Image (cartoon, helix red, strand yellow):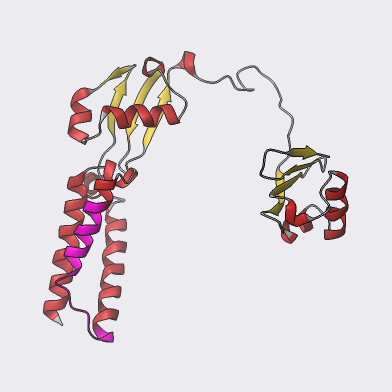
Amino acid sequence: MLSFIGSLLFLFFVAIVVVRFMGKTALAQFTPHDFTAIFFIIAIAMNPIEVNTIGKALTGIVLIIVLHLSFSRLSLYNSLNRFIVGEPTILIKHGKLDRANLKKSRFSLAELLSSVRSQGYADISNIQYAILEPNGAISVLPKEEAMPVTAKMMELEPEYQGFPMAVIIEGDIQYENLRLIHKDKTWLEEAMKETGFSNVRDVFYASVKDTNRSLVVDDGQGTIRTL
């Protein structure tokens, strides 16, 4: 049993070190080679560990939980957090790419451009900072002139627009949501008929605003009707 625990501890730490060495990108978005590499690491790490009794299985589960909780606790200390979790890395600063940090992080320029575009920034000159977080996500802080205008900036008091409650999802009535808006199946079926749908099963998605009870019906084939 002692050799089993020792092997488990050793391979657990080795797997963590290897994944950390692979870089933050492996944690953020699984490319085919990232997924394959992590899969093989797990398979190879587990291969030497023989779990053939209930006692070993329970010991292994408890040990991994204790290790996980210990690492979570240790990551709360700033002095240890950088070694366990890692540190944020600046990839764009004042609209300029940091090639050295990109290389150091093993984060390709194509991946970076794709990430910032997905957040609505096609032009990197509009970005104050783009930061690669320890979990592999990209945080984008735009320049002041590129920030979207908010109601607060314009000193406006926006009205609450209401929350759309899904009442039909893929032909199934969402009874709990109907109850929240104080409606029932009979009301919904009548409302469907008014929008031209005699059978609820023909509706792909329908929602009701919690403010004015306005209804939006989508058949999933390009037809949207409101009531």
**Residue at (30, 44) in percent of width and height:** 31
- Residue 118 sits above or below residue 61 on the image: above
Judging depth in this view, the residue of 56 and 41 nearest the camera is 41
Q: Does the magenta-highlighted stretch encompass residue 39?
A: yes
In the orientation shown, which residue stands out farthest toward the front? 221
- Residue 11 sits above or below residue 90 on the image: below
Residue 125, quarter of picture: top left
Judging depth in this view, the residue of 10 and 50 nearest the camera is 50
- Residue 106 sits above or below residue 76 on the image: above
Residue 51, position in %: x, y?
Answer: 22, 79
Residue 177, quarter of picture: bottom right
**Residue at (20, 55) in percent of width and height:** 16
Give left or right: position of 66 versus 16. Answer: right
Residue 214, position in %: x, y?
Answer: 81, 40
In the orientation shown, which residue stands out farthest toward the left? 3
Quadrant of the image for the N terminus? bottom left
In this rendering, the count of numbered labels is 0
Residue 199, position in %: x, y?
Answer: 80, 55
Residue 178, quarter of picture: bottom right
Give left or right: position of 176 versus 151. Answer: right
Give left or right: position of 104 versus 32. Answer: left
Q: Does the magenta-highlighted stretch encompass residue 106?
A: no
Q: Which residues are magenta?
A: 36-55
Quadrant of the image for the C terminus? top right
**Residue at (27, 68) in percent of width and height:** 64
Residue 105, position in %: x, y?
Answer: 21, 35
Type of secondary structure dominating the magenta stretch: helix
Give left or right: position of 62 versus 195. Answer: left
